Image: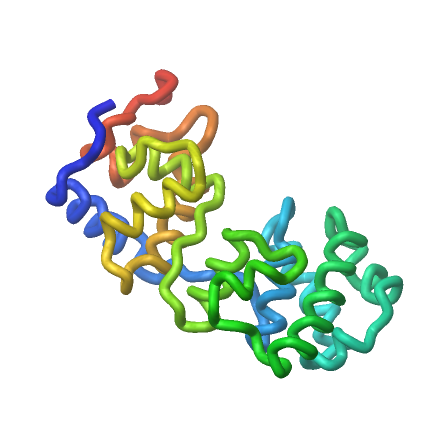
């Protein structure tokens, strides 16, 4: 694999991603920034579709951060019971609501470090919230973003933090958020972990990993 790419290759990758997924965006549904944080916490180890189904249930019972701070963990767990790890997620959401109320005046902190101090909020969750709801440019590295970045030659690393830095260096800030969603679309449709669909991939002519694992 020829790494790293030169700037011309990056521009071509960027162009192809924009051509094929111009409307790629976060699919989680939420009414406000805190509710979006809830959705992102809920999204661990499950699909966006399942999360949106659960969020619809939450929206019938809860409105705004104070409601999440007031509900008991057992009652919140019951509302989240269709999700994996729902008890852990309920505890994290409840504690987030309390800490945001007590330490941040009821508003989600825009500072990445402060956001990552909240329960259940790691680097990826913080980046998703910052970029998609708080207007702070950020790159969220999930398994799709990591895999596609490696195969496209955008990063040599297997570590999320290093992949994030590589992407930040190669793409302008105003592309960071949508770039992640486009790489996710690419990973789901073509650049799969096993038996990737290289022959139908719109980036196959610029991808040094084209034909990986002898895919057809």
Q: What is the quadrant of the C terminus in the image?
A: top left
Instruction: Give the image location of residue 49, x and y in percent.
Output: 60, 55
Task: Report the coloring of the rendering.
Answer: rainbow
Instruction: Give the image location of residue 194, x and y in percent.
Output: 47, 25
Residue sticking out furthest to the left? 8
Q: Would you say 94 lies left or right of 78 here?
A: left
56 lies above or below 107: above
Of 104 and 204, nearer the camera is 104
Q: Residue at x 52, y 59 (%)?
A: 126
Q: Would you say 14 lies left or right of 66 here?
A: left
Q: Residue at x 16, y 45 (%)?
A: 12
Instruction: Give the image location of residue 105, x and y in percent.
Output: 62, 83
16 lies above or below 28: above
Which image quadrant is residue 37 in? bottom right
Q: Residue at x 74, y 47 (%)?
A: 84
Q: Would you say 50 lies left or right of 129 here?
A: right
Instruction: Give the image location of residue 40, x and y in percent.
Output: 59, 59
Q: Residue at x 70, y 75 (%)?
A: 59
């Amino acid at each position: 694999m020829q790494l790293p790419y030169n700037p011309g290759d990056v521009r071509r990758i960027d162009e192809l991603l924009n051509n094929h997924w111009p409307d790629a965006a976060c699919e989680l549904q939420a009414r406000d920034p805190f509710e979006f944080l809830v959705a992102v916490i809920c999204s661990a180890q499950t699909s966006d579709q399942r999360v949106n189904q659960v969020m619809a249930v939450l929206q019938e019972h809860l409105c705004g951060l104070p409601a999440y701070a007031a509900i008991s963990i057992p009652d919140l767990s019951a509302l989240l019971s269709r999700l994996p790890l729902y008890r852990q997620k309920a505890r994290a959401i409840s504690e987030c609501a309390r800490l945001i109320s007590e330490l941040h005046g009821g508003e989600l902190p825009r500072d990445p470090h402060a956001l990552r101090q909240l329960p259940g909020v790691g680097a990826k969750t913080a980046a998703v919230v910052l970029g998609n709801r708080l207007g702070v440019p950020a790159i969220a590295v999930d398994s799709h973003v990591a895999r596609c970045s490696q195969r496209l030659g955008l990063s040599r690393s297997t570590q999320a933090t290093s992949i994030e830095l590589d992407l930040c260096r190669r793409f302008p800030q105003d592309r960071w958020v949508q770039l992640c969603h486009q790489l996710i679309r690419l990973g789901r449709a073509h650049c799969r972990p096993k038996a990737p669909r290289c022959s139908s991939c719109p980036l196959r002519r610029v991808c040094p990993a084209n034909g990986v694992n002898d895919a057809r």
